[in-house]
Amino acid sequence: MSLREKINEDIKKAMQKKNELLLLVLRGVNAAIHNKEIEKRTKLSKNEKDIKKLEELSKLSDEEILEAVSSEAKKRKEAIIEFSALGGSASGGGKEKIDNAINKEKLELEILKKYLPEQMDEGQI
């Protein structure tokens, strides 16, 4: 099963289980994959005029899909850093909202990590 098939299968499962957070994250990943395919197709269309061949050539490999997932994970990490920086200067209800945003980003990041290869820690290197 390709990574794209796994993501689509997990979207179906999330819909059945009514897991809104998982569904939100996976739909975002699917949109990122779709955008990456459009970008690839646009580049290829300059040289390839046969539509069927262009469609086939523009399909993303698992490696390219991993790049899209990795990019989404990177966005979450950056958001956590930004929110954390804001959290230090916030007070009262503002701090609570920032903490909630940080927790949401962390949960989304954990979901995305399930689709990325396991990273080696310094001890393994």
Image (cartoon, grey):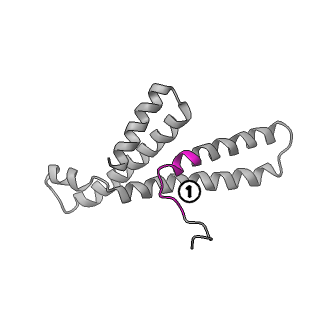
Q: Around disc 1, counting alpha carbons within 10 Å, would you say few (fewer than 14), some (14 to 19), or many (20 or more)? A: some
Indicate whether 28 appears above or below 48: above
Horizontal side of residue 85 vs 53, given as left or right: right
Q: Position of residue 108 (x, y in %)?
A: 58, 44
Label 1 is placed on what type of residue?
Lys
Horizontal side of residue 43 vs 63, given as left or right: left
- Please give the name of the residue rendered at 53% of the width and 51% of the height, measured from the top-left corner: 113
Quadrant into which the C terminus falls: bottom right
Q: Position of residue 74 (x, y in %)?
A: 56, 56
Q: Position of residue 92 (x, y in %)?
A: 86, 38
- Residue furthest right in the image: 92
Q: How many marks?
A: 1
For residue 55: magenta? no
- Please give the name of the residue rendered at 52% of the width and 48% of the height, measured from the top-left corner: 112
- Residue furthest bottom in the image: 125
Indicate whether 124 appears above or below 61: below
- Residue furthest left in the image: 50
- Please give the name of the residue rendered at 26% of the width and 54% of the height, measured from the top-left corner: 58
Q: Main secondary structure of the magenta part?
A: loop
Horizontal side of residue 121 vs 30, given as left or right: right
The magenta span reads 110-119
Rendering quarter of residue 67: bottom left
Q: Which residue is mark 1?
A: 74
Viewer-proximal residue among 30 and 43: 30
Q: Position of residue 72 (x, y in %)?
A: 51, 52
| SS state under label 1 | helix
Viewer-proximal residue among 49 and 40: 40
